[in-house]
Image (cartoon, rainbow, N blue to C red):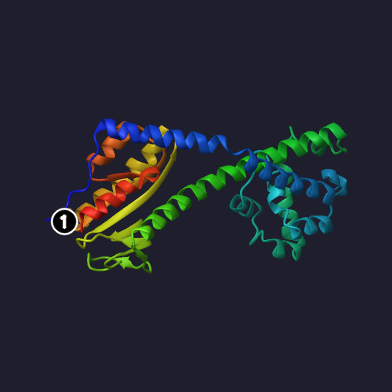
Amino acid sequence: MTSAPPRWTTAKLAEAAAASASLFRSERLGVSGVWETHYKQARDKFELLFSQLSDLTPDAITDNNLAEAYGRGLGEALRYLASPPISDDDLQVIADVDSIAPGVLKKNPEALRKVFAVIERVIDPYRFPWVKAGGVPTSQQREAALLASSVLLAAQRIATERRNQGKENQETQVKRYLHSLGFTEAPAVAINTIVKGPQSMQFCAECQLGERKADVVVRLHDTRLMAIECKVSNSATNSVKRLNNDAAVKAEYWLKQFGTAQVVPAAALAGVFNVLNLEQAQTRGLTLFWSHDLDQLGAFIATTG
């Protein structure tokens, strides 16, 4: 007889959610060194851009120094002259060019000018008032523009880093924990029947389970598959999207596709979650574990032996 996955009481869910939120707050408050690094890197880029393009003085910007700016990896800084900053994809579409890769633009003056014409049209008038006026910045204007632009780019980089690293770090944490239990990682394969995928004492990452991808799939000791979704949330509102509209939907699909006797849908959670959302996801068949207490995951795996 297979062991049933744990179902937590409201009190236990509230306790775990509070501990996870506390860890999230501590991590967010400990970013001073990271911020300093990103700000300095961004400042260096804009200092170099201003030097390359003569402080963005309109009459001094030529095809040659524009090409040199792109060649020196300053395309990102150029996009951040816009208000708001324009993405690579949007810039390419709006400029109507085949590519905005530095190597391509350096060899194609016409495309280069089309790209910069877009940036000129949407350049931030508050950070760069002298550009629209066709003049030269004062020292105060130059410093204000450098400061504001560096802060803008640094903030965006940290936000992107948090989005990308949060889930990656969590997946790594789960995989390391499974390794500590004696499991080994198997190559990812498409799993369309329960006998496929990782075998005894194995797990795989980013596996296609039926028609939905799972972050980590573990072969339990009783031959069932546990599909673990790694979810990081930075707010109670965000937890609805991460948990109820994604992980719980996958759980319902996997249970319908493979059956409760064959698969255990689960989530490893980190960050801020609303207790009501946790209860709702659990009711829909999702087994909940926390990154700060993976021993609960290990305890359940042990019961399947």
* Residue type, numbered disc 1: Ala
- Whether residue 211 is visible to the viewer of this picture, yes or no, is no
In terms of image quadrants, where is residue 96?
A: bottom right
Q: Position of residue 18 (x, y in %)?
A: 38, 32
Side of 102 relative to 7 (left or right): right
Q: Residue at x 59, y 53 (%)?
A: 89
Q: Position of residue 240 (x, y in %)?
A: 36, 37
Q: Residue at x 72, y 36 (%)?
A: 148
Is 141 or 170 nearer to us in this picture? 170
Side of 261 relative to 78 (left or right): left
Task: Answer above or below: position of 248 versus 277.
Answer: below
In terms of image quadrants, where is residue 17?
A: top left
Q: Residue at x 40, y 57 (%)?
A: 175
Task: Answer above or below: position of 72 versus 233.
Answer: below
- Whether residue 180 is visible to the viewer of this picture, yes or no, is yes
Side of 88 relative to 135 (left or right): left
